[in-house]
Amino acid sequence: MSPLAVRERPVVAISYTDARMAEDDDVLYARRVAAEVRGITDTVIDGRHAGVAHFDGLEDPGTLPVTDLPSMSLGVLSVLAARLVPAAAHGSAAHLTGRGGDNVLAAASSHRVDQFLAGYRVQAFKRGSDFARAVRIAPWRAWQQLASTAATPYPRALARMADRMSAAPFSYAWRPSPQDSLAWCSATAAARWLTTAGRQAVADLVAARVPDAGAYRAPGALHDRLGLEWMAAEHATFDTIARQRWGLAAHAPFLDTKTRMNGRGRAMLLPVARAYSPSRSGPRCGRSACPSSPPAR
């Protein structure tokens, strides 16, 4: 977003990092963009030095921002404050975020199943090997899950998940498997925290989707749409919180209607099975991204 925004006026780019994120590509790329594009002032907020952590600031529920939907942004209020208070102090009236970029320019891991179902089975298994290498599992595990998902209708997958959620509790040591992202649906790590009533509520919610699930044939395309819908809803609550707490309007250009009808619309026309390549960073970028951005390395 920064190379586009700086065409209109100077930009203060604020990146957040912590002990876990210190070597992530996001901060390294932000620094590189700021160094190569004139007019961008790069500011890095390190959570280790700022004294912030996830789930801080939730002690008094009565003081929390009110949103129309449950918001994951409430879990990172202190992190958001570390990022947005400097922006508000700088006099910024708006905060640009790259939210939705991964949804628009990349593809769900399960796109490999879509490719398999479209008849490109050799290519799908090759991409399954690439996936296995990236998540550090044996290739046969990825292949097994890919084939299982391709052979399982979505309603059956939902019914199995509902049964699993209402059965015995997940052990505290349980963790989801990396290959679960190739499945139609699966439990997340949060499942082991749920009470019996909580697991039954989730099971009922999943079971309620079964009657209408038969229309979906490709998990990658479905996950693409669901991910985009979730990101848009989450951004709406983030914008509400930013306006209430810091007087900043949060904008996500990747989710804007105008972007969707122009560059993003062309990007999303690229079939999900072609939206990823092991040797290329975000093929959809070629249809929507700004050419003034330094290429990813």
Image (spheres, rainbow, N blue to C red):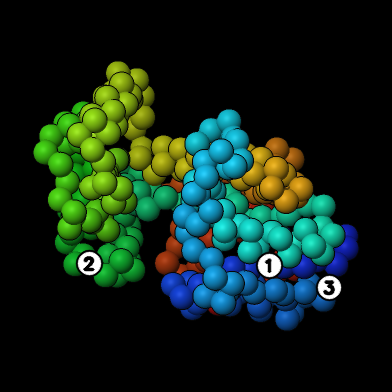
Q: Secondary structure at mark 3?
A: loop
- Residue that label 2 marks: 137
Q: Amino acid at mark 1?
A: Ile
Q: Callout 2: few (<14), some (14-19), or many (20+) C-alpha neighbours within 10 Å? A: some
Foreground mark, 1 or 3?
1
Q: Mark 1 or 2 closer to N-term?
A: 1
How far apart marks 1 and 2 lie (CA) works out to 35 Å
Query: Label 1, on which residue?
Result: 14
- In the displayed structure image, the side of residue 177 where residue 168 appears, left or right: left
Q: Amino acid at mark 3?
A: Gly
Q: CA distance from mark 1 to mark 3?
A: 14 Å
**Furthest residue in direction right, as rendered:** 9
From the viewer's perspective, is 144 left or right of 127? left
Q: Which residue is label 3 attached to?
A: 39
Identify the residue shown where x is 41% and y is 37%: 222
Q: Position of residue 7 (x, y in %)?
A: 85, 63
Name the residue located 59 percent from the left edge and 42 percent from the top edge. Answer: 63
Q: Name the N-terminal-most of marks 1 and 3.
A: 1
